[in-house]
Amino acid sequence: MLAFSDLREATYCPRKLYYARRRDDRTVPEAVDAVRGLAHRYDAILAGGCDDELAELAALPPATYREQLRRTADTCPRFDGLCDPADRDVLLTGRDCRGIAGKVLTDPPVPSVVSPGKPPENGVWEPHSVWAVAAAKALAWERETPVERAFVEYPAHGVVRTVAITARRTAAYRRAMRTVEALDGPPPRLRNSSKCGPCEYADTCGVKTRSLSSLLGL
Ligand code: SF4
């Protein structure tokens, strides 16, 4: 049974998964949990509260955050459900993988996974797409009903993105499964990848990150 987190790491970089698995402590840091907690305070934030939490945990000043969250509330198709989900922090166990969904909505069932990070300009990062598909597949297996989409929440930024479970996304999820299953020893380093700069294992990995100017040949 594969872990959602392993699929996510393998999609980012198979070598990163190799390092993550060798760590003794893979518990989620308290700071990450605290940021994710903002995803459970949308109603209070929109009502004008939680300024102290926003000042401490959000990536935007409280007033800007609130404006962004209002835009999210206006555009997200099930924002009310995300404010008051049927279940929170649920362990989902599917046929192939298992892990925690931050929220589960019902009628129809939709999982939401919650990232402490920053969203891309549009859509979701590829590791988060794989994570969302994994949660949707596991929920579909448990409920014995198709799950056609998932949400990825970025509560530090007041953003929620919808992920349709398409054939392309499912193919990426299956590729990640094969990568995790085949992991045996350290995979090759990525070459000249922007992923290496923010990677927590960059020092251990010994990868040489090149400056933007050198990549551009300046
Ligand atoms: S530094 Fe780069 S190659 Fe090494 S584990 Fe991280 S992302 Fe992968």
Image (cartoon, grey):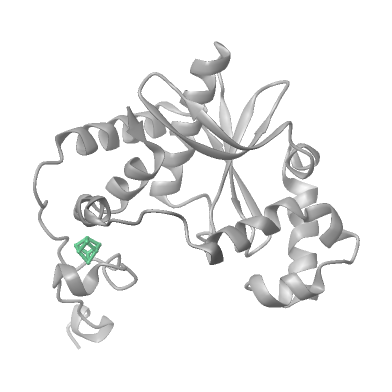
Q: Name the outermost residue toward the bottom.
A: 218
Q: Position of residue 101 (x, y in %)?
A: 55, 38
User: Residue drawn 39% across and 48% down?
Assistant: 126
Picture coordinates of residue 39, whole percent (x, y): 69, 53
- Image position of 130 with respect to 127: above or below: above
The residue closer to the viewer here, 91 or 191, is: 91
Residue that protrudes farthest toward the front in the picture:
24
Q: Is residue 195 left or right of residue 132?
A: left
Residue depicted at x 45% and y 47% = 128
Above or below 217: residue 22: above
Residue 52 or 212: which is nearer the viewer?
52
Residue 36: x and y, percent?
61, 56
Residue 68: name its quadrant.
Answer: bottom right
How many marks can you see? 0
Left or right of 155 on screen, residue 22:
left
Identify the residue at the far right of this view.
47
188 sits to left or right of 87: left
Taking the spot 78% from the left edge, 54% from the top edge, the residue there is: 42
> Is residue 39 or residue 121 the one in the foreground?
39
Q: Residue at x 38, y 44 (%)?
A: 5
The C terminus sits in image quarter? bottom left
Q: Quadrant of the N terminus?
A: top left
Ligand 1: give its quadrant.
bottom left
